[in-house]
Each structure stands twice: as structure tokens, then as C-alpha cells.
Image: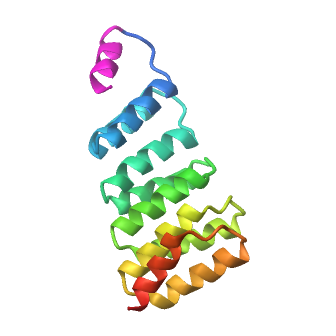
Amino acid sequence: ALHMFSVMTQCTVQLDRIAFGATMSACEKGSAWEKALRLFGAMNQSAVETEVIIYSAAISACAKCIQWAKALTFLSEMAHCRVEADVVAVSSTINGCKNGSAWQEALHLSYGMNEKKLELETLTFNAAISSCSNAGKWERSLQLLAVMAQSKLEWAMISTNAAISACE
């Protein structure tokens, strides 16, 4: 994907957000978060409008490679640029926090999703519960399970197992 992107730029093909987004997603799948961030920077320099899908691709690339602080920065930048975060952007950031043991950030984002009325998803809560569990914060894991119950989300075995393992 990066080679094709490079060929397109050499052939003076006008690149759009679809080309940037697809290439950034390929970088995420290949665990090449630095390249995804360079593409994001190049996109901003080329005056191609950024939107939630592009930010989500950058966040996902960072989160997958345990660059949770960078994922949080992108999520914050979205608000600054008046790009409304969606469930994908927030859930990807929470996953990055889980992988990086940033349980407080994961918890804050989970509660923020509820306040913003973003569509709550079981997978998002699983990541936040796992993050709290990994940090030994069993009380927080149980609180998130309670929020899941109030939200009428379908409980998954992984949610319960993550909370139980935090209690051990």
C-alpha cells in the first residue's frame, strides 16, 4: 500500500482522503504507526480535509502499537479541530489504553462515551474492564460491569472474566 501510494505521488495523481485513509489503515494492519503518522502529517500539508475516519485510522495505528498517549493526543486534536469523535475513534483509543496499562484514561473515556451518548458497545467496555483488571483495579472493573448492566449491553464472558481476574 505504501509503495502504491508513493507511485501515485510520483505520477502527480491528486491524492484524496480515501487514498490517505486506505494507506493509513494498511499501516495500522502492518503495525507501522510511525508511517501512518507521517501520512497524517502529509495529508495536513496537502490541504486534504481530515475527517473522523482519518483520525480513527491514525488512532487505531497508534493504539495497536501501544502508543496510547499518541492516540489520546489525536482524540484531543479532533475536538480542537471540531471533528466529532465517533465510537470507533474512542473505542480504538480505549484499546490503546488497555494495551498500555493506562487504566485511568480508559475509564475516563468509557464514562465520557456514556455522557456524550455515543453508542456504547460491549467491546469498548471489555477493553476498559481489561485495562482496570490489568492494573489490579477490581472496584473499577465492577463499576464498569454495573454501567454495562444499566446500559442493557449484552454481557460477554470476557467482560465477566476480566472483572473476576481483577478480584484475584
| Number of marks in the rendered image | 0
**Compared with residue 12, is residue 40 higher up or lower down, i.e. above or below?**
below
Choose between 36 and 122: the one closer to the eye: 122
Image point (27%, 42%), residue name: 32
Image point (43%, 74%), residue name: 130
- Residue 7 location, x and y as percent? 30, 14
Image point (65%, 78%), residue name: 147
- Residue 51 location, x and y as percent? 57, 39
Is residue 116 rendered to the left or right of residue 137? right
For the question of whether residue 104 can be seen, the reply is no
Segment tinted magenta in the rendering? 1-11
Choose between 34 and 12: the one closer to the eye: 34
For the question of whether residue 100 can be seen, the reply is yes
Quadrant in which the N terminus appears: top left
Q: Is the magenta stretch mostly helix, strand or loop?
A: helix
Image point (57%, 43%), residue name: 52
Choose between 41 and 144: the one closer to the eye: 144
**Compared with residue 14, is residue 83 higher up or lower down, i.e. above or below?**
below
Examine the image and state in which quarter residue 149 appears: bottom right
**Compared with residue 57, is residue 9 higher up or lower down, i.e. above or below?**
above
Residue 2 within the segment the image draws in magenta = yes
- Residue 107 location, x and y as percent? 52, 75
- Residue 13 location, x and y as percent? 41, 11
Seen as rendered, the residue at the extreme front is: 157
Please say which color scheme the image uses.
rainbow
Residue 167 within the segment the image draws in magenta = no
Examine the image and state in which quarter residue 168 appears: bottom left
Seen as rendered, the residue at the extreme top is: 11
